[in-house]
Amino acid sequence: MGRSPCCEKAHTNKGAWTKEEDDRLIAHIQAHGEGCWRSLPKAAGLMRCGKSCRLRWINYLRPDLKRGDFAEEEDELIIKLHALLGNRWSLIAGRLPGRTDNEIKNYWNTHIKRKLLSRGVDPLSHRLNNRPNNKSNSCNNKFPKEEVIMADFFQHQDSDVTSSSTKSAASDPDTAGEEREDINLDLCISLPCSTLPKNNLKKIRVIIEDKSRCQS
DNA sequence: AATGACGCCAACCGCCCTCAA
DNA sequence: CTTGAGGGCGGTTGGCGTCAT
């Protein structure tokens, strides 16, 4: 059972892309646009899976990508966004122009995790490690911490757009005025409507709906 | 110089969601 | 309403470079 494979595996290349493959992909997309990824490999003369082409383009070949090291401000922004959104790498990437979700995910796993640990902060919960945390969060522990925080955040955004969203942290009695003080949400975080993937919009909607149902 | 350990990151995999038929 | 194609996402893997011994 299960789904049919996205492409004919027997006749597709895998592994690192060659310069020639890159050139073919770039030339095809420049000529025809991104269009249908499934049919792109054949049209471009590539022995690659459509998904592989998409990934290569999005993560490496797109002309608007900002390559190179992350700035300190980007580091801090990623940390703050991760505290809000959790591992929603595509959402986080949407707030960092020129960065991809894959790049941010890798950077998080290799650099930022370590950075937070060295500060004594748990990279998952964004709490200080040196304190026991045995209080359950609201909603019977049903939701991961980040989701509850995020739902609170968006609810506050509705009622008070201009205020600092340190409120979102303060709304959680567990952390009010404590570990989350460092999360300065003067970022003017808003849903990047033009770039936000449909999937994520739905996820946010679901989280907020579940949260409000839980509160009622 | 050899080699084993470790870190980084590009790429893959499998699942989920949307949407058209 | 159901189904399947296609796209997108997050987690994981594997290859390569660097460092330590």
Image: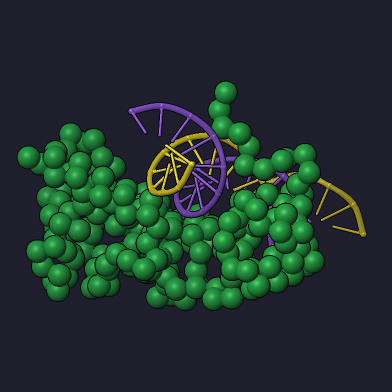
Chain colours: A green, B yellow, C purple
Front-lying residue, A196 or A176:
A196
Along the line of sight, which residue is nearer the eye, A30 or A97? Answer: A30
Taking the image as drawn, is residue A87 in sight?
yes
Residue occupying the point 13% across, 62% down: A158
Kindly give the residue lying farthest to the left in the view shown.
A216
What residue do we see at 37% from left, 54% from top?
A198
The residue that appears at 43% across and 64% down in the rendered structure is A93
Task: In this rendered view, identify the residue nearer to me: B20 or A30.
Answer: B20
Image quarter where the C terminus of chain A lies is top left
Image-quadrant location for residue A193: bottom left
Q: How many marks?
A: 0
Q: Position of residue C20 (x, y in %)?
A: 69, 57
Q: Nearer the viewer, residue A108 or A209?
A: A209
- Residue in the image at 27% along x and 67% along y: A190
Residue A13: image location, x then y, percent: 77, 49
Is residue A182 at all visible to an observer of this figure? no
Spot occupied by residue A20 in the image (x, y as percentages of width and height)? 79, 66
User: In the displayed structure, would residue A120 be above or below residue A131?
Assistant: below
Q: Quadrant of residue A215?
A: top left
Residue A173 placement, left or right of A180: left
Image position of A9 with respect to A187: above or below: above
Q: Is residue A139 left or right of residue A207?
A: left
Percent across and percent down for residue A196 are 37, 62
Q: Residue furthest top?
A: A1
Residue A73 image-quadrant placement:
bottom left
Q: Quadrant of the N terminus of chain A?
A: top right
Taking A125 as reference, is A55 above or below it? below
